[in-house]
């Protein structure tokens, strides 16, 4: 009888020592939730940095690594004047391209909107790089749904220039 009591108390204490291990996942979940705000904070910081520059005349080379028709991939040179898209030309030919293919990417603020949309839609994967001086995105890779193929986007922004 005394032996079974000792075993019962021992098992009870052993179970009590395991409680912190059993409560570990909620702590990890809370940390993951807190880290999910990082892309939003980075976006807000860089959008503010961009806005403070007050740049309304610029051009950049844009490429879209999507699973789409070749004409929609680029690379293209997008020129913006007074905050409005002035021209989109093919790097390969120097000729204007169909602006509809690039309507979501033809200004820096629209590129910020792409990132915001991926965050709002809780994309499965979001990888963004920003220019450290001016704040504009230089790379935006989004996989909206990890279980679906060919819906990812891979955007690159290069050769950014402020123009007069």
Image: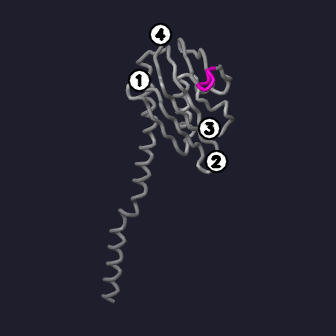
Camera-side residue: 25 or 3? 25
**Is residue 62 rendered magenta in the image?**
no
* Residue 131 located left or right of residue 116: left
**SS at mark 4?**
loop
Alpha-carbon neighbours of circle 3 within 10 Å: few (<14), some, or many (≥20)?
some
CA–CA distance between discs 4 and 3?
A: 32 Å
Q: Which quarter of the rendered picture does the N terminus lie within? A: bottom left
Instruction: Indicate which label's residue lies in the foreground, 4 or 1.
Output: 4
Are the residues flagged by discs 1 and 3 in contact, CB closer than 8 Å? no
Badge 4 crowding class, 10 Å Cα cut-off, few under 14, some 14 to 19, many 20 or more, is: few
The kind of secondary structure the magenta stretch mainly shows is: loop
Q: Position of residue 108 (x, y in %)?
A: 52, 23
The residue under label 1 is 134
- Colouring method of the image: one colour
Residue bearing the label numbered 3: 66
Residue 93 painted magenta: yes
The percent coordinates of residue 74 (x first, y second) are 61, 30
Q: Residue under circle 2?
A: 149
What residue lies at 57% left-to-right and 43% top-to-bottom? 143
Q: What's the distance in space between the residues labelled 3 and 2, CA to CA?
A: 11 Å
The crowding category of the residue bearing disc 1, from other C-alpha atoms within 10 Å (few below 14, some 14 to 19, many at least 20), is: some
For the point 58% across and 27% down, the residue is 105
Q: Are marks 4 and 1 in contact (CB under 8 Å)?
A: no
- Residue for point 55% across, 40% down: 142
């Amino acid at each position: 009888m005394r032996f079974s009591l000792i075993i019962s108390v021992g098992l009870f204490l052993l179970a009590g020592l395991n409680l912190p291990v059993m409560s570990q996942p909620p702590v990890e979940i809370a940390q993951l939730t807190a880290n999910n705000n990082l892309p939003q904070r980075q976006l807000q910081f860089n959008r503010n940095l961009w806005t403070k520059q007050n740049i309304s005349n610029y051009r950049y080379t844009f490429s879209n690594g999507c699973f789409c028709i070749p004409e929609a991939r680029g690379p293209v040179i997008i020129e913006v004047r007074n905050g409005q898209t002035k021209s989109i030309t093919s790097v390969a030919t120097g000729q204007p391209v169909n602006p509809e293919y690039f309507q979501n990417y033809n200004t820096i603020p629209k590129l910020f909107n792409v990132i915001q949309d991926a965050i709002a839609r809780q994309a499965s994967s979001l990888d963004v790089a920003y220019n450290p001086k001016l704040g504009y995105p230089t790379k935006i890779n989004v996989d909206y749904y990890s279980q679906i193929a060919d819906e990812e986007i891979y955007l690159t922004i290069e050769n950014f220039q402020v123009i007069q």
